[in-house]
Image: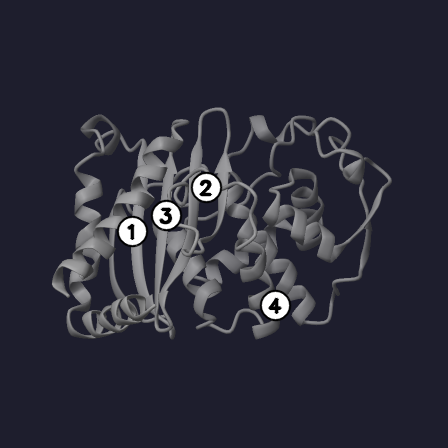
Amino acid sequence: MKKILTLLLFITVAISANSQELCKVFDDFIKIIPDSVKNSNKASYGIRIIDKKGNIICENYVNKNVQFTPASTIKVLIAMKILQLIDEGKLNFDTKITINQPNANEDGGGVRYSRGVIRTIKELLTDMIEESNNIASNQLIDIATKEKINKLADDLNANNTRLYRKVYDFISGEINKYKNSTTAYDLAQIYTEISTGERKILSEESRMFLIDLLGNTTINNKINADFPSNIKFYHRTGSTSKRSADAGFFYLNNDTIVILIGLQNFQNSKLLSDFGRIILNNFLNNLQKKM
C-alpha cells in the first residue's frame, strides 16, 4: 500500500514538473504501426492528456483529422443529446417508448427489443452504451433527430463527426446510401467534455450517469483488453465486418485524465489492444524508473 501511494504521489509531481513529456509514450506505439497502414490512411490513433478542467496537457495523433466510419463509437454522442433533452425537461428517464424499428425483430436484440415492446428512456440509454444495442440506438436517434445530434457535434467542435444514418439498419436502405463519420480529434473533443464537463453541455447528474454507463460496457477486447483490473477505462467500442474502433478515457490520478482513440478501416483488435497496453505500460514503467 505504501508503495502504491508513493507511486501515485510521484505521478502527480511528475505531471506537474514535466507535463509535455507524457505524450512521448505515444512514439513507441507509432513504431509498430506498419507504414502501409499509416501512409494509406487505414488507421487513426490519438492520445490526449488533460487536467480535470479540460485544459490540454499534451496530445499526439496519427492521421488526426482523417475521417473514418465510427461504428458504435458514435453512440456516445447520441447519448449526450438524449441526456441534454432530459436536462432541458423535454424527456425524463421514465418516459416510455414503444419499439417500432423496422429491423427490430431481425437485429438480434432479443425479445426485449421486438416491435411493440415498451422500454423506458433510461433502459434504452443503458442498453445502447453498455451492450451496444443497435435497436435502442436507432430508437433514440428517432427521438433526438440526426440534425440535433450533428448540431451537438458542432457545439463540441467535433465538426467532422456526422450521423447520416442509423446503425446496422439494412431494411431502410440508408446503409447503402450514407456513411457516418468521425475523426480521432473529434472523439478526443467529445471525451474531453464527457470526462470534465468543461462546456457545461450536460448537467453534472447526467454527465456522471453517462460516465457510469461507459464504465460498465460489456465489450472490452480492444484498447483496454490488457488493462489491469484496477485501471477503469470508460469507453465505447465499435465494430463492423471491416471496421474496428474504440475510444474512451481513464483517470491517471485525481487531476489528470488520459483519452485514447483508435479507429481502423480493417478488423484487427490486436493493434488496438497493443495500443492500450503500450501506452499504459510504457507510461507507468517510465515513471517507476524515475522514482
Which is more foreground, mark 3 or mark 1?
1
Residue corresponding to mark 1:
280
Which image quadrant is residue 114 in?
top right
Mark 2 to mark 3 CA distance (whole Å): 14 Å
* Of the pair 58 and 229, the residue shown nearer to us: 229
Which disc is residue 206 wearing? 4
Which disc is residue 180 wearing? none
Looking at the rendered structure, the secondary structure element under dot 3 is strand
Residue corresponding to mark 2:
181
Question: Height in image: 59 above or below 217?
Answer: below
Which is more foreground, mark 2 or mark 3?
3
Looking at the rendered structure, the secondary structure element under dot 4 is helix
Q: Would you say 191 lies left or right of 134 here? A: left
Do the numbered discs 4 and 1 sit on residues whose CB atoms are within 8 Å?
no
- Residue at horizontal 70%, vertical 29%? 108
Is disc 4 surrounded by few (<14), some (14 to 19) or many (20+) residues within 10 Å? some
